């Protein structure tokens, strides 16, 4: 007996969107595989764990430079990118966050848990993020919690692959608050009582992406930024400053 088969029919628009998504994902996956070096043999490389060595910034460790290894720079510093971490299971692919967090490559970053979870765990395989931040050396970013004025935040861009996303969210700011009412009622409470968000968004100094760029860019939290921008534009009271995570590039000496 043949097993029962259930058919689902998509609208033409949904089918086109699904095909486009699959096409871009497979295309990007192909570029990643073509660019990825062969896997190292066991014992070939030193352990990626970083210790606090005297005179060396904790985000860097010296290692033998090996030709063709994308995880090392010409100076011998271990380098990790979103592509380096691509094969580690995470949200939506059967992974567990604690297992991901304890992975040797991930743990060497020593990032704040909020940033690790909201960016690398939840969105580390998001195609636009791979396109916009795929060349960023994750080991060379230091995170600080900062309070930034509303006037500055409402004008910040996000990555070019989804450049209009914050503006689109701003046009529907009340809708996006409403989508949180059932599971996260504290979101509406925070906006109405404190004029700000519950969880800190993630910003990145654009010089970490390209040394010729200046200013900050919104990596994760585009819905929160859309709500802030929309309420501010509508004349709804918001806080004067808002708490955010900011990642800035660092040098081996430990300075910015």
Image (cartoon, rainbow, N blue to C red):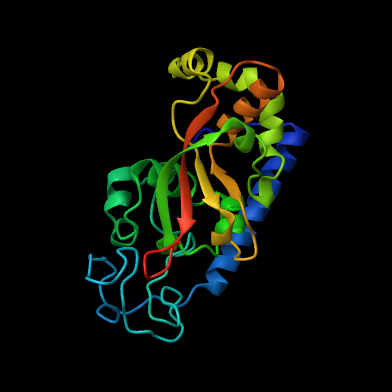
Quadrant in which the C terminus appears: bottom left
Residue shown at the point (37%, 70%) measured from the top left: 253
Evaluate whether residue 6 shows in this view. Answer: no
Q: Position of residue 20 (x, y in %)?
A: 70, 48
Residue shown at the point (24%, 79%) measured from the top left: 43
Q: Quadrant of residue 235?
A: top right
Residue shown at the point (66%, 54%) measured from the top left: 24
Q: In this rendering, is residue 249 above or below 170?
A: below
Q: Which of 25 and 7 lies nearest the eye of the viewer? A: 25
Q: Tell me how many marks there are.
A: 0
Q: In the image, is 107 to the left or to the right of 127? A: left
In the orientation shown, which residue stands out farthest toward the bottom? 67
Q: Which of 189 and 116 lies nearest the eye of the viewer? A: 189
Evaluate whether residue 206 shows in this view. Answer: yes
Q: In this rendering, is residue 42 above or below 166?
A: below
In the orientation shown, which residue stands out farthest toward the right? 12
Q: In the image, is 105 to the left or to the right of 238? A: left
Q: Position of residue 153 (x, y in %)?
A: 60, 36
Q: Position of residue 232 (x, y in %)?
A: 66, 23
Q: Which of 29 and 131 lies nearest the eye of the viewer? A: 131
Q: Quadrant of residue 252?
A: bottom left
Q: Quadrant of residue 239?
A: top right
């Amino acid at each position: 007996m043949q097993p029962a088969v259930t058919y689902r029919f998509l609208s033409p628009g949904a089918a086109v969107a699904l095909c486009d998504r699959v096409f871009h994902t497979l295309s990007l996956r192909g570029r990643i595989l073509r660019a990825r070096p062969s896997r190292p043999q066991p014992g070939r490389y030193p352990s990626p764990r970083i210790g606090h060595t005297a005179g060396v910034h904790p985000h860097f460790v010296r290692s033998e430079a090996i030709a063709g290894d994308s995880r090392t720079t010409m100076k011998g510093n271990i380098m990790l990118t979103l592509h380096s971490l691509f094969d580690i299971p995470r949200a939506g692919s059967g992974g567990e966050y604690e297992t991901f967090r304890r992975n040797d490559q991930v743990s060497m970053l020593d990032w704040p848990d909020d940033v690790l979870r909201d960016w690398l765990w939840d969105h580390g395989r998001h195609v636009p993020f791979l396109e916009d931040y795929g060349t960023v050396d994750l080991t060379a970013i230091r995170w600080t919690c900062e309070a930034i004025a509303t006037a500055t935040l409402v004008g910040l861009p996000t990555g070019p692959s989804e450049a209009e996303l914050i503006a689109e969210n701003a046009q529907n700011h009340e809708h996006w608050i409403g989508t949180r009412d059932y599971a996260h009622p504290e979101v509406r409470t925070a906006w109405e009582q404190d004029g700000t968000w519950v969880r800190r968004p993630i910003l990145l100094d654009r010089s970490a992406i390209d040394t010729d760029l200046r200013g900050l860019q919104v990596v994760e939290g585009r819905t929160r930024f859309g709500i802030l921008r929309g309420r501010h534009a509508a004349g709804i009271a918001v806080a004067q400053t808002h708490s955010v995570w900011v990642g800035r590039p660092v040098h081996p000496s430990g300075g910015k």
